[in-house]
Amino acid sequence: MFPSISPAPEIGLAVLLVAALVWVLGFGHMLWGSRSHHPEPGAQGGLPAIPAQRGAGAHPMESVELTEAEEQAFAGLIRRIAPH
């Protein structure tokens, strides 16, 4: 191949190039496969992009009991944030 390089580095270079080519082809195949097997968001039969919200009593860790003062403070905050 190269007259100035001995056979051992030539073999190493060839193995390295083949390994890089296999990696690139495998990576491209993986990316192409992931695109072709997953439906577009909102497509019929696919998973929604954002999961549906659970009901109010779905799990005890998902709700917090507020005191009257906290409820009033939260209501005041919402009134300030909400557009009129």
Image (cartoon, helix red, strand yellow):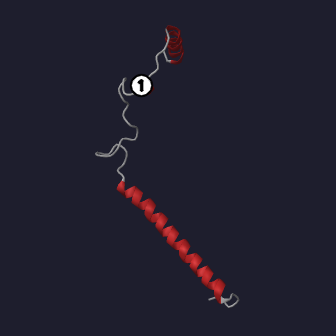
Query: Is 44 located above or below residue 5 in the figure?
Result: above
Residue at the disc numbered 1 = 60
Q: Please, what secondary structure does the residue beneath circle 1 have?
A: helix
Question: Residue placed at 39% from the left, 27% from the top?
Answer: 59
Question: Residue placed at 37% from the left, 57% from the top?
Answer: 36
Query: Is 23 located above or below residue 13 in the figure?
Result: above
Query: Is 78 located above or below residue 48 in the figure?
Result: above
Question: Residue placed at 44% from the left, 22% from the top?
Answer: 63
Counting from the top left corner in percent of width and height, residue 67 is at 50, 11
Question: Outermost residue toward the front?
Answer: 60
The amino acid at mark 1 is: Pro
Question: Outermost residue toward the bottom?
Answer: 3
Q: Is residue 21 left or right of residue 54?
A: right
Q: Tag 1: Cα neighbours inside 10 Å, few (<14), some, or many (≥20)?
A: few
Counting from the top left corner in percent of width and height, residue 27 is at 49, 64
Counting from the top left corner in percent of width and height, residue 18 is at 54, 77
Position of the N terminus, as image quadrant, is: bottom right
Front position in the image: 60 or 43: 60
Q: Is residue 12 left or right of residue 42?
A: right
Front position in the image: 69 or 73: 69
> How many numbered badges does the structure rendering display?
1
Q: Is residue 81 left or right of residue 55?
A: right
Question: Outermost residue toward the right?
Answer: 4
Question: Residue placed at 40% from the left, 56% from the top?
Answer: 35
Q: For residue 80, which quarter of the picture?
A: top right
